Image (spheres, rainbow, N blue to C red):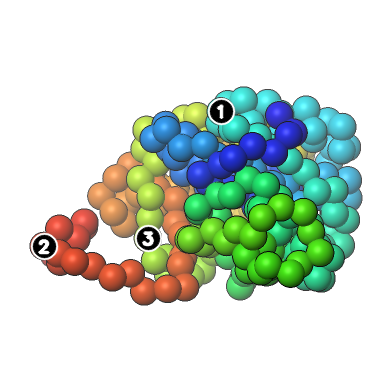
Amino acid sequence: MDSIAKLDVLAIAAHRDDTEIVCGGTIIKLVDLGYKVGILDLTAGESGSRGDAITRQREADCAAEVMRLTFRHNLHLPDAGLFLTQENALAVAEIIRAAKPELVILPYIDGQRHPDHSAAGEIGYRGCFLAGLGKMPIAGEPHRPRKILYSCSFLETRPSLIIDISSQYERKCQAVACYKSQFEEIPGQRDVYPPARNIFDFMEIQNRRYGYMIGAKYGEAFYQKEIMSVDDPLKLPGKSI
Ligand SMILES: [Zn+2]
């Protein structure tokens, strides 16, 4: 599962369960559509309050199987000590050159509770940029992803788009359920995602809310910096009134 293969889509996140929680339905949907999808976890979760790195490795492998990833790689950068540095961005750039994804999914940078999540978005963006420069001191041919989407589910920002994950929601929950060390109930330790009392309640509320916005049962939210061009406005999805 660890060797780098050619991908269509690479999701980058700070911690092993981040991608599953914020955009796992979209990852599964992309695989359902026939794309090759991989995840790059920047840290091994060694500083988390719950579970150790070996347990979290097993859990991440379990989730990768549920999502049918092409590969899942870990950079083993310091957990709870993730910062935007040239060294970290180059490490990401090297993976991007090897996997050559067209689409990269990053954590939305603003408004994150855990500072590693913002840092992962910054490192990921810079990694995408540096991967395309010819004279970087890293292996591989220059490659720059064409599209970057920032995963912004559960943050107070207006998304650019919402992806319907109604057919994938159940498998998303299965992927998140692999992380038993994180989400099995321990009284008094259930305040990570207030006000919901556990992660599954939280996802049910939030993914239903995003689904509601597009007339679907479940959805996941994304932001993109660029404005999209449209050739035929009559074929724009969504109803205005
Ligand atoms: Zn995290």
Q: Secondary structure at mark 2?
A: helix
| Residue 12: percent from left, percent from top | 65, 52
Choose the circle earlier in sequence order: 1 or 2: 1
Disc 3 is placed on an element classified as strand
Q: Earlier in the sequence, mark 3 or mark 1?
A: 1
The residue pinned by badge 3 equals 161
Q: Amino acid at mark 3?
A: Leu
How far is mark 1 from mark 2, CA to CA? 36 Å
- In this rendering, position of residue 176 left or right of residue 235: right
Mark drawn on residue 234 = 2
Mark toward the start of the polypeptide (3 vs 2): 3
On the question of residue 43 being in view, the answer is yes
Quarter of the image with the N terminus in it: top right
Label 3 and label 1: CA atoms lie apart by 24 Å
164 vs 134: above or below: above
User: Is residue 184 at least partly visible in the picture?
Assistant: no
Label 3 Cα neighbours within 10 Å, binned few <14 / some 14-19 / many ≥20: some
Kind of residue sitting beneath label 2: Leu
User: Could you tell whether 177 is left or right of 186 in the image?
Assistant: left
Q: Is residue 68 left or right of residue 29?
A: right
In the image, which disc is placed on residue 68? 1
Query: Which element is circle 1 on?
Result: loop
